[in-house]
Image (cartoon, grey):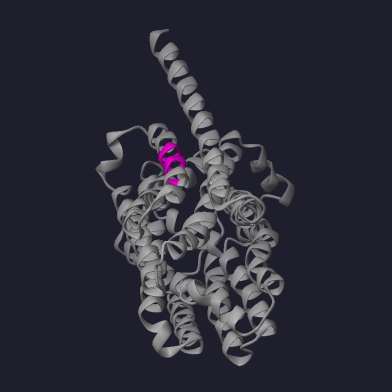
Amino acid sequence: MQTIQRNQASLILWIVVFFWFAQYVYIPYQTTYLLLAHISSNVVGAIIGAYGISQLALRLPVGILADLSSNHKLFIILGTFFAGTASFFRILLPDETGFLIANILSGTASATWISFMVLYMSFFNKEAQTRATSKIIMANNTGILLAFVTSTFLYDTVGMMVICAFSLGAGLIACLLAFFLRTTKPTNQPKVSVMELLQVLKDKNLLLYSCLALVQQGVQMATTMSFTNQVIQELGAKNMEIGFSSIIYMISAVFFAKLASTKFLELLTKKQWIYSSFLLLGIYCLLVPQSSSVLMVCFLQLIPGMGTGILFSLLTSEALQSIPQQKRSTAMGFFQAVYAVGMTTFPIISGSVYEHVSMKAAFIFLAGTCFIPFIISLVFSRKKARKSHKRNVS
């Protein structure tokens, strides 16, 4: 890689860390803060849901616009600006109105994540795409990890508004750094129309791995970001211990994302990593509600960390493996919109099962959703292996 490209790639990783710090530093205590402000649980649900719904609505259109313009720098600047501005509204209007506006802006910011990934991956050749994907996901997880550490240790001391000020500052730093990116120019290839871009939605790899990512991200959001914390709380954990549980998960995610960018990944084939990870994720969902101690749950948090670090990296790179460069933003927009469905619906469905049946039933449901892609990816892997064997024999 040339020096200029290497410097640009490094700059993007720094922007990614600040961007996701801005997006997540207030997350662990957002629900608690709103409920203590005497805002009804239904309104709180709508505020939190606004983040996912805005992503669902915007990710594919943003991907199409990014492909048509090829100006990823602009989208990165806008995304980082919206991430910081969102917390400005939380500080300016520290009530349901301010947080609703803010979460819509945060969702809009997350929709531009497409351009971060596509631009970064464009600096690497086809053989290095998995390693590149792992590196940018590691930067993503590092930003979230630093956000969780900050809020865990400082929230009780400084309160929500100062935490939001950290988010505002990180977003503005990321926005400033984004101005130092080189403006991306359209390729020399013929211009493609919107209808041509939408043809990528017929790509079988994109469809398969998008659906697998829907499950992985949905289970992650329903467990590590939600009900696993509830399990720990019911075991008698305090706020600090709940925070440590989330930190262990994020450290694991960063560690395994780092491993996914090394020769460690060669211990198994990509297909074997994928179905093995889903199997482990399903086992995690069965074990968490059976745990009798906070320490055991914290240890189990290493498993979804691997799911985020290795599994999600592989699902992303495999989904885009057959997509031409000039259509990658559209494909990435579709991929992210599909897994955003999981992030939005899985917590809702799990919450309903928890409310009407039990916490164990909710986790059994989530385990079942992991075992389905485990079987699908296992069968798909075996079919690929048989076809490859037949070609080699003939």
Query: Can residue 362 be seen from the camera position used here?
Result: yes
Query: Can residue 323 be seen from the camera position used here?
Result: no
- Is residue 10 toward the left or the right of residue 158 in the image? left
Residue 219 part of the magenta segment: no
Task: Write the residue at 42% across / 63% down.
Answer: 140
Front residue of this view, candidates 153 and 21: 153
How many discs mark residues in the rendered view? 0
Task: Write the residue at 40% across / 35% down.
Answer: 276
Q: Which quadrant of the figure contains the N terminus? A: bottom left
Q: Using the image, determine if residue 37 lies above or below residue 246.
A: below
Residue 279 part of the magenta segment: yes
Q: Can you give x and y, in whole percent of width and height, for residue 138 in the image?
A: 37, 58
Front residue of this view, candidates 188 and 385: 385
Task: Write the residue at 50% across / 69% down.
Answer: 183
The magenta segment: 277-284
Front residue of this view, candidates 42 and 125: 42
Q: Can you give x and y, in whole percent of width and height, for residue 50 in the image?
A: 67, 68
Q: Using the image, determine if residue 259 lies above or below residue 109.
A: above
Q: Using the image, determine if residue 127 lies above or below residue 237.
A: above
The picture quadrant where one finds residue 55 is bottom right
- Is residue 8 toward the left or the right of residue 36 in the image? left
Magenta residues, dominant SS class: helix
Q: Residue furthest top?
A: 394
Task: Write the residue at 27% across / 35% down.
Answer: 267
Q: Using the image, determine if residue 220 lies above or below residue 158.
A: above
Q: Can you give x and y, in whole percent of width and height, for residue 319 in the image?
A: 52, 42
Q: Can you give x and y, in whole percent of width and height, for residue 261 in the image?
A: 31, 49
Q: Which quadrant of the figure contains the C terminus? A: top left
Q: Residue furthest bottom?
A: 92
The picture quadrant where one finds residue 91 is bottom right
Front residue of this view, candidates 359 and 275: 359
